[in-house]
Amino acid sequence: MTDTPARLLSLLSLLQTPREWPGSELAERLRVSPRTIRRDIERLRELGYPVEATLGAEGGYRLVAGAAMPPLLLDDEEAVAIAVGLRAGAGHAIEGVEEASVRALAKLEQVLPSRLRRRVGALQSATVALTRGDGPTVAPGTLTTIASAVAGPERLRFAYEAGDGARTRRLVEPYRLVSAGSRWYLVAYDLEREDWRTFRVDRVGEALATGARFAPRELPMDPQEFVRRGLRGRQTYAVEVTFAAGAAELPQWLREAAVPEADGGVGRTGTRVRFDSGDAPEWLVARLALTGLAFTVREPAVLRDAAGALGARLTSAASAR
């Protein structure tokens, strides 16, 4: 193999297999001399790939973990598997990894050959995921379109259905995607209304990046806070819950949404959190119970009633023969 770039890619592909490769075997597979293999290994190291060499007559090589992650080479099956997995996760606000999943999916789908994009789409349309049911699902294609427009930055056009059912067409300058508990939101500057707006992504349809670049405007506050303030202006209710656990033990969605009291809540053994919610009380109390932590609902009364009803049903189910 005389083409140096192609040979380096082939060598890297072999080294990414989790095993140690004798220099003679690499030379035989690539049909070059052991000396050429040694030079190619040095080139990979210069590019940031941490290739470790072992001493001995054969001299083995293997790729090890480094301080940074250089680009990976994936074969067709690996690329399809990763894209399908990211799509399955990106359609639901998975706590802790949701935004990274969307960024990774947007990057991967941008470089996938058309033949692989068709395979990924076919697999996605033919499968149904059993989800947690904690919020509306979002089409992964919509998320990746928006994420790519944010990264561009590129103006975005889409159809939008408001909470009252009204349908409009929007032209915006997308700023950030924000995952808030069980939902995705787009923070963007609405060009026709000449103001910042928050859009629920599950209500976005026909998203299309227009190709028109723009200089990003400065949002007057943190995007998470902007979404949070927007939610408070809708039909939400204030929640106050005390957990018999430290703040560090709470799941991420509670740590981010909670507002601890200035005096540290109820002391060292507990944490009092306050947040606004638009979820049905029956669902919210079930989600609180799924944390696995003991808690007491202080406000509102409708949430206390939902907790009592859920407790009674669970007690009945446990005592039934």
Image (spheres, grey):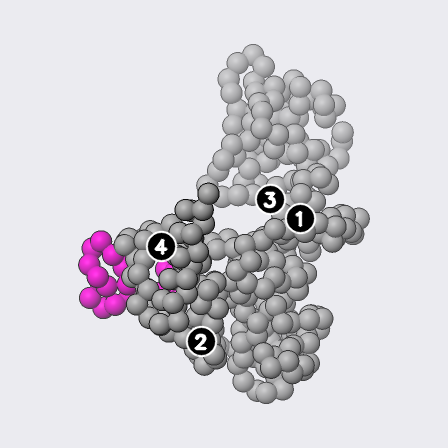
Is 295 on the left-hand or right-hand side of 235? left
> Residue 57: where, in percent of width, then height?
56, 12
- Which stretch is magenta? 254-272
* Residue occupying image coordinates x 65% and y 59%: 140
Please state which amino acid type lies under the numbered disc 4: Leu
Badge 2 element: loop
Badge 1 element: helix
Q: Nearer the viewer, residue 30 or 163?
A: 163
Q: Name the residue under label 4.
A: 250
Quote the CA–CA distance across marks 3 and 1.
20 Å
Q: Name the residue under label 3.
A: 71
Please state which amino acid type lies under the numbered disc 3: Pro
Q: Nearer the viewer, mark 3 or mark 2?
A: 2
The reply to whether the C-beta atoms of the residues labelled 2 and 4 are less than 8 Å apart is no
> Residue 237: where, in percent of width, then height?
41, 75
Please state which amino acid type lies under the numbered disc 1: Val
